Amino acid sequence: MPDLFDVVRSQRAHRRFADDPVPDAVIEQVLEAATFAPSAENRQPWVFVVVREPALRARIGDLVRRAWEGGARDHSAGRLPAGMLADVDRGATGGLAGAPVIVVVGADTGDVHPRALEASVFPAVQNLLLAATALGLGSALMTLPLAFPAELAELVGLPDHVRPVAVVPLGVPARPLGPPRRRPVSEKAHRDRYGAGW
Amino acid sequence: MPDLFDVVRSQRAHRRFADDPVPDAVIEQVLEAATFAPSAENRQPWVFVVVREPALRARIGDLVRRAWEGGARDHSAGRLPAGMLADVDRGATGGLAGAPVIVVVGADTGDVHPRALEASVFPAVQNLLLAATALGLGSALMTLPLAFPAELAELVGLPDHVRPVAVVPLGVPARPLGPPRRRPVSEKAHRDRYGAGW
């Protein structure tokens, strides 16, 4: 198994997937890693709907496409590098739906104070993404379909008290990706007070 | 370095710290891991204010204490197991302020669509916590001081466009902690539709 820092440094957003099957046992390993994340009062408010049914994956893919073509693409067109825009475009118009597994992640609003809800579910999502990376799966953290939260919730039958917070495709990557590009710590860290520099 | 799954399975919330110093080089390793997290449009909206100044740490500790004694303790008293309640109580009334380093994490609201803001910063927080765990540091994801966001922002000089989202104490643990307790995947995962079981 690769060490934590190697996994952290190689995590990328994958938006195209091969047809290779992903066994339940691998999904369980990935979700188990998610459950070890912290949450307020250790309430563990995460909900994972693991979608394999082709028709359902296609409908989630349709939501993503509608969100992308209905405004998100225009928003991003002036902001993303051309290569990344093309990659997101392919992902939003077919790549996501081509993943053999799509995990819809929800947060149980009955478990946690609203102020702590996101803090109590996105760490689990990140564990899920890191575990997928460690096991050779491609993945991505998608919030695009949350443009239509009621429709997404209805597709996978979420009750009113479970709010969808993310959609994560999982599958063998269609192609390898290089290391991520990030701005250095020195641009993001401040000593004692914002603006003091590092 | 330990493998990803060992780190994931041993992460715990630490609320009491030894006096041992934590070098800048270690803080940089931890923050670098944070910067490899995903974010919407790869905008990397995270902001880390690394607080070492004793007076400033004490004032952040005061915020935590006020939030805890002003309502959070009453809210949690009926919900937490006695041992965990006592541990949080000690943390909120002195343990946090005793950490040699407190990282105030912010999110730059100018970088990311509001719908994706939390999804673009809590994965970085989780990477930070995992990296700390891997390097032998205790840590905790605290949202208690966000009961007073304006006061927290003012203490560390955050400008209006940077919203505080979490406070993370870092230090050598005062005592080792056992493995975390979590509900199994089978209680959290659903096949294709919520309620279908796993």
Image: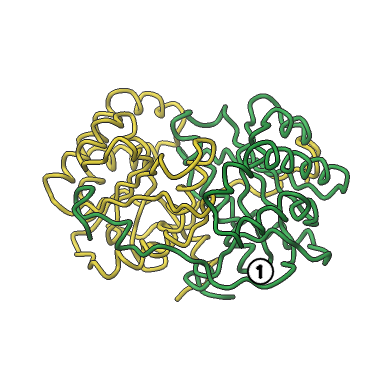
Chain colours: A yellow, B green
How many numbered marks are there? 1
Coordinates of residue B101 in the picture (x, y in percent): 77, 54
In this image, B42 relative to B71: left or right?
left
Coordinates of residue A23 in the picture (x, y in percent): 22, 68
Residue under the point 11% across and 45% down: A55
- Quadrant in which the N terminus of chain B is drawn: bottom right
In this image, A170 relative to B31: left or right?
left
Front position in the image: B103 or A88: B103
- Quadrant in which the C terminus of chain B is drawn: bottom left
Q: Is residue A187 visible?
A: no
Coordinates of residue A85 in the picture (x, y in percent): 37, 36
- Name the residue carrying label 1: B135
A75 in relation to A140, above or below: above
At label 1, counting other C-alpha atoms closer than 10 Å, the crowd grade (few under 14, some 14-19, many 20 or more) is: some
Query: Disc 1 marks which amino acid?
Result: Leu
**Residue B70 location, quadrant:** top right
In this image, A67 relative to B52: left or right?
left
Front position in the image: B150 or B21: B150
B16 in relation to B67, above or below: below
Front position in the image: A85 or A46: A46
Residue under the point 57% across and 47% down: B76
